[in-house]
Every structure is written in structure tokens, then in C-alpha cells.
Image: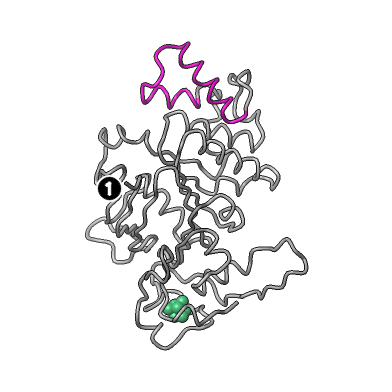
Amino acid sequence: MNLLEIQKLKVHFPVHQPLFGRAKEFVHAVDDVSFAIAPGETVGLVGESGCGKTTLGRAVIKLIEPTSGRIVFEGEDIAALSGPELRARRRRFQMIFQDPYGSLDPRLTVADVIGEALDIHGLACGATARRQRVDDLLKDVGLDPSHASRLPHEFSGGQRQRIGIARALAVEPKLIVCDEPVSALDVSVQAQIVNLLQDLQQQYGIAYLFVAHDLAVVKHISRRIFVMYLGRIVESSVAKEICCSPKHPYTQALISAVPVVDPDAKRKRVLLSGDLPSPIHPPRGCPFHPRCPVAEARCKTEVPFLREIEPGHHVACHLNVFQQTVL
Ligand code: SF4
């Protein structure tokens, strides 16, 4: 059984909410997205800024209220849950935030940042058990338990991200949404945090939804990758297929922009013209058609839906993706 199943999820934000009546325009941040995550699996979610990946990551764990669709977590639809019902289930899904500086309360010691989560969910009986659990979690994320009484500003960016990971781990989640968890860190520290996440996954069997714009990082950690464009998933497959044999013209452009280690390796760079269109008025037909280097006439009027072109490889494109390539 899948750990998480997202079915036809939409998140539309009103552009301007009048005092009376209904909003007339909406930002189509997430549009008709469906996917599943197995227990202990890492799924990468990539796309350029503004494509809706962070909104989708937050909506699947109900930090943002979805407009419609189902969020089936461990067999139960949590999309409509709120209040105490949602709180009771919240410990099973957690989030690691992009900003290790802003995501920790500067007034709380590390022991309290982590202990607060234990208190809320009643996971440590008494001060001794709480302290022991905090110490164990700090060791799990590679920090010295003797630093538990320090404040967040006394730590480096990488150490603060480790504290954020310990806080998420405290409630023994089954799924962690990692929202650009390394993009604010130095490159050398990024690798350490990614390796730590992989080690913790081995140890605890946690599933990750890893949201990032850096395909090189996503490729390293993910078993499968979903590529998002203007609120929709346009391609999904196992990481190797996406990176070595991308089929959607947008994925091909993303892959062509990833730096290669071998200076002799030749790869044609696909430059996309224009910016991401407005999610308030997404283009008709294929949302990618104004920037697509191989668009046809019907791309302007017909919406391409995700279709399976090989087992487990889905692409939303009208063209015969085995014949065309822009790389
Ligand atoms: Fe390009 Fe048309 Fe495919 Fe969209 S459907 S990606 S516009 S070729």
C-alpha cells in the first residue's frame, strides 16, 4: 500500500478577495496533480521558481488548504480534516524548511525547540525522559548533546538545519516534506545534509518528498523525480530515466542546464525563451507552448495529459516523444 496518494489536487489562491461576493481571479498554483509515494521512498519534485512545487509540498501535509482533491495518507483521506482531528495525525508527516535561520524560534534553546514537539504529542513522560530523547535526537543528526542548552544563533547554517531535522524526527514521522532543505547552505555543507537525510531514511524508513530547483541534488537523493511546470506535473519517472533520457521538452531544457563534471562532455544547452507565464492566466492548451521549441499548432488549443510512454514513465506532451528531441 502507498504511504501517500494525491488525487487531482488543486490549490487556487484568490488574487483579490472582495469584502462581499466571490473572488474573480485565482492563482492556479497547483492544478490537477496526482501521484503516490511508497513507504520509505524518496521522490524529488523539481521545477523553476514559481512553478508551484513549494505550494504542492505544503498542501500535501495540510500546511496549505487544498481547493479540491484527495490526500490519502496511510489509507485515510485527510484533505477535509481540520482542528483536533488533523492535529492528532500531524505527527505522521513533518516538514523541513528551506531557511535554517528563520525556521527556529530564536528565543528557545535547542532542547526546547526539539522538546516542544515531544510535549505537543505527549511523546516523553517527565523531564528525564524528555532530556534523554532530545540527546538521542541530537546524536542522530550529528550534534553534540552538550549543546542542547544553546540558542539557535550560536550555530552555523548547517547545524541549524540539523536541529530542524531533529525537530521533525522527534515525532517519529512516516513522511517528511523537505522544502529546498539545502539551497540556503554552502555547497560543502549541502552534501553533508543530503547524506544525513539518506542515513536517517535507512535508519527509520522515512519517506521524503524532496522539493528543490537543483536537479543535481534531487538526482542524487531521489528514487523517482516529478517535474513541475506552471502547477502541473509534466513528466515523472525514476531518477535515472529523467536525467539520462528526459522526454518532455521542458525537462530536456532543465537537464541541459545542469553542469557536467567532465569538461570534454558535449551537451547542447537548450535555452528557453521568455519567463514562466502568469499562473493567474495560464496559456490555453499546453501551458508550456509559448516557450516550447518544438510546439505545434494543436499545442495552443489542446491540453496534453500525462500518459504512460513506458512502464512508470509519464509525459504530458502531444508529440511522439521517442521521435522528437531538442537536446
Ligand atoms: Fe511542447 Fe506541444 Fe509538447 Fe507542450 S505539447 S511540450 S507545446 S510539443
Q: Position of residue 289 (x, y in %)?
A: 46, 79
Inspect this view and state whether residue 289 appears: no
Q: Position of residue 106 (x, y in %)?
A: 56, 30
**Image label count:** 1
Residue projecting furthest to the front = 311
Observer-nearest residue: 185 or 18?
A: 185
Indicate which quadrant contains ligand 1.
Answer: bottom left
Residue placed under numbered mark 1 in the picture: 79
Left or right of 70? Residue 301 is right
Q: Is residue 3 above or below residue 151?
A: below
- Residue 195 located within the stretch drawn in magenta: no
Q: Position of residue 219 (x, y in %)?
A: 57, 56
Q: Main secondary structure of the magenta part?
A: helix
Q: Residues within 10 Å of mark 1 (few under 14, many from 20)?
A: many
Residue projecting furthest to the left = 21
Question: SS of the residue at dot 1?
Answer: loop
Tell me the quarter of the image containing the C terminus: bottom right
- Identify the image quadrant of residue 89: top left
Q: Is residue 160 above or below residue 150?
A: below
Residue behind label 1 places its C-beta within 8 angstroms of ligand 1: no
Q: Is residue 127 above or below residue 25?
A: above
The residue lying at 44 percent from left, 59 percent from top is 52
Left or right of 248? Residue 188 is right
Inspect this view and state whether residue 130 appears: yes
Q: Amino acid at mark 1?
A: Ala
Q: Is residue 240 above or below residue 1?
A: below
Residue projecting furthest to the bottom = 297
Q: Position of residue 163 (x, y in %)?
A: 56, 31
The residue lying at 61 percent from left, 75 percent from top is 270
What segment carries the magenta color?
A: 113-142
Left or right of 234? Residue 143 is right
Residue projecting furthest to the right = 263
